[in-house]
Amino acid sequence: MNQFDSAMFLENIEWFDETGKELVHRLPDSGSGEIKWGAQLTVRESQAAVLFYKGKACDAFPAGRHTLKTGNLPIVTKILSIPWRGNSPLRAEVYMANLKYFTNLKWGTRNPVAFRDSELGLIRLRAHGVFNIQIVQPVLFINSLVGTMGKFTTDDIEEYLKRVIVSRFNDYLGETLDTILDLAGQFDELSRELQKRLILDFAHFGLHLSQLYITSITPPEEVQKAIDDKSRLNVIHDMDKFVKMKAAMAMEKAAEGQGEAGAGIGLGMGMLLPGMFAAGQTQAPAAQSAAPQAEIACPDCQNMIAADARFCPLCGHQQLVLSQCVNCGKNLAPNAKFCSKCGHATSEKPQLSVCPKCHSENIPGAMFCNQCGERL
């Protein structure tokens, strides 16, 4: 069909948003056109149309079928536009605005925001949420943001709106929030007040901010750990008893994990625990002022323990030596059949070292012969 054949027919103009993300779409898609007198425009309930004729917004159309009136008359205009190579200078285009709610648009702080907390000091916060928008003034929206673009989607405006929300959020949070420890029950209130501050920013472009939600406000990981530690301290009323209980549980676990050798640890734990709890419950003033108890180093783990202790409370090493391993010298628990350190049988006799030169017997573990001095 040549240009003169197409000039004989009128247009049926309508638009469907297949992506669900287009805010505005221009018809014809290729640019400005020669929409003729009598062209039919169909607008859906969720749409509004704006006719631009000779470069100006002439009229806005609600839902329904409308007859467009331009200076482009079928056939006649095409003949009169011969000096312009058959293209009529009476340009016209229709912009279709999508009036539905665009939901689940996300906003969030790209970088942590500095905030002076009354409880934790200067910290950095991240915030995230969602918001919904709707076009309420199509002509204003098209003139201020869309311009002559063929289509305008949520991707084109979402980044800008995010920055506007974050900017207002930073100011509002600094003015109203005292400490993040009070955030638990304030998300709804913060969302409502922040939305009120943003209404004019969105209305400036013909948009309505229908809903805004704050889904999270989180400090850095190290601050979260500090909050958790503070919560634990508030739960524990008697730190002394808590530490003693943890020590008792550690010794019990160590005794369970070492088999028969754990018998000595269990015996020492049973002897130490009553004294530990009795000291925590009843401590006379005279005992506080008494001279400190003598201490010695455990020969196994070097932990400082009471001089009269029979077992080390840290490693369970037996201080009162009943017998030692003939292989490694480890102190053995009563009736132990094997050494808990090297696994050597306690009933076995030590193997003497024989000198390869003079064939003299030396004590186990000797490095040189005590007769001739030869290296064993």
Image (cartoon, rainbow, N blue to C red):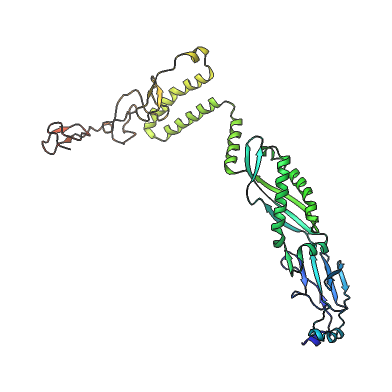
Q: Is residue 157 left or right of residue 60?
A: left
Image position, residue 336 (x, y; %): 33, 30
Q: Position of residue 278 (x, y in %)?
A: 50, 19
Query: Where does the N terminus fall, quadrant-wise?
Result: bottom right
Identified at 59% across, 40% down, the residue is 223
**x and y, in percent, of residue 257 in the image:** 42, 36
Displayed quadrant of residue 118: top right
Query: Residue 375: which quarter of the image?
Result: top left
- Answer yes or no: is residue 20 visible: no
Task: Name the side, left or right, on which 221 lies relative to 215.
Answer: left
Return the residue found at the far left: 358
**Quarter of the rendering containing residue 39:** bottom right
Left or right of 173? Residue 241 is left
The residue lying furthest to the top in this view is: 286
Which quadrant of the rendered structure holds the C terminus? top left
Q: Nearer the viewer, residue 146 or 107?
A: 146
Between 95 and 318, the residue placed more toward the observer is 95
> Does residue 56 lie above or below 85 as drawn?
above
- Nearest the viewer among 181 and 356 is 181
Is residue 86 placed above or below 256 in the rendered structure? below
> In the displayed structure, would residue 7 be above or below residue 357?
below
Q: Residue at x 47, y 20 (%)?
A: 275
Furthest residue in direction front, as rendered: 83
What residue sits 80% from the left and 69% below the top?
Answer: 95
Number of numbered discs overlaid on the protein picture? 0
Closer to the camera in the image, 166 or 376: 166
Seen in the image, is 129 located left or right of residue 268? right
Q: Which residue is depicted at the point 63% across and 39% down?
A: 122
The image position of residue 219, as x and y in percent, is 62, 43
Q: Mark yes or no: residue 302 visible.
A: yes
Q: Above or below — where is 147 with respect to 288? A: below
